[in-house]
């Protein structure tokens, strides 16, 4: 069975591609620096945290005490005292959905308030007294009563 011209052409292209790949592989192998043990590359970190190829100046070294390093998230310094009545202003309240937010007048912290935690109905922009609790997503206002 005789080969067609098209089949010979495809075979010739395959051989050409194979040859080019082999040449590229050989070129990469010859120009590679990873196999060269004489040249070792280092990266240094300077005093600003940037990577450089120059070692840092030992005179600029800062001593760090191991005990001062805190791993993890530091504890919040929010001292939330129980039974401490707070005063704030209702910044937002949606009566249909039954939730809103109260901004404390002294610390400007914002507290979430739910309709279940109201002793009497509230509206936006009125002053209220409330107790604070820590909820699963943040601070919650409970026992909310209007000032009037």
Image: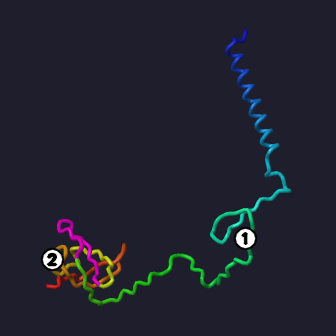
Q: Which residue is mark 2?
A: 121
| Residue stretch in magenta | 90-105
Q: How far apart, in angstroms, are the residues tagged by discs 2 and 1?
A: 65 Å
Look at 44% across and 81% down and name the residue there: 76
Q: How many marks?
A: 2
Look at 69% across and 12% down and name the residue there: 5
Residue found at the very far right of the displayed protein = 38
Mostly what secondary structure, the magenta segment?
Answer: strand
Q: Which mark is residue 56?
A: 1
The image quadrant of residue 52 is: bottom right
Look at 68% across and 69% down and name the residue there: 46
For marks 2 and 1 on the same chain, the one whose residue lies earlier in the sequence: 1
At numbered mark 2, what does the secondary structure look like: helix, strand or loop? loop
At numbered mark 1, what does the secondary structure look like: helix, strand or loop? loop
In this image, 82 relative to 24: left or right?
left
Can residue 104 be found in the magenta stretch?
yes
In this image, 97 relative to 49: left or right?
left
Point out residue 74 in the picture as x, y percentages from the top left corner: 50, 79
Q: Name the quadrant of the C terminus.
A: bottom left
Q: What kind of colouring is applied to the model shown? A: rainbow
Mark 2 Cα-neighbour bin, 10 Å: few <14, some 14–19, many ≥20: few
2 or 1: mark nearer the eye: 1
Depth order, front residue of 87/53: 53
Point out residue 91 in the picture as x, y percentages from the top left corner: 24, 73
Look at 39% across and 87% down and name the residue there: 79
């Amino acid at each position: 069975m005789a080969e067609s011209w098209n089949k010979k052409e495809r075979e010739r292209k395959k051989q050409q591609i194979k040859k080019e790949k082999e040449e590229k592989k050989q070129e990469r192998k010859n120009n590679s620096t990873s196999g060269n043990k004489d040249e070792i590359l280092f990266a240094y970190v300077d005093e600003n945290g940037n990577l450089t190829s120059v070692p840092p100046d030992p005179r600029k070294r800062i001593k760090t005490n191991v005990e001062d390093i805190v791993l993890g998230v530091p504890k919040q310094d929010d001292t939330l005292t129980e039974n401490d009545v707070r005063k704030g202003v209702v910044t937002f309240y949606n009566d249909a959905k039954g939730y809103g937010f109260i901004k404390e007048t002294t610390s400007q912290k914002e507290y979430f308030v739910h309709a279940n935690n109201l002793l009497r109905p509230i509206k936006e922009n009125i002053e209220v007294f409330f107790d604070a609790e820590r909820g699963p997503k943040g601070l919650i206002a409970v026992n909310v009563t209007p000032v009037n």
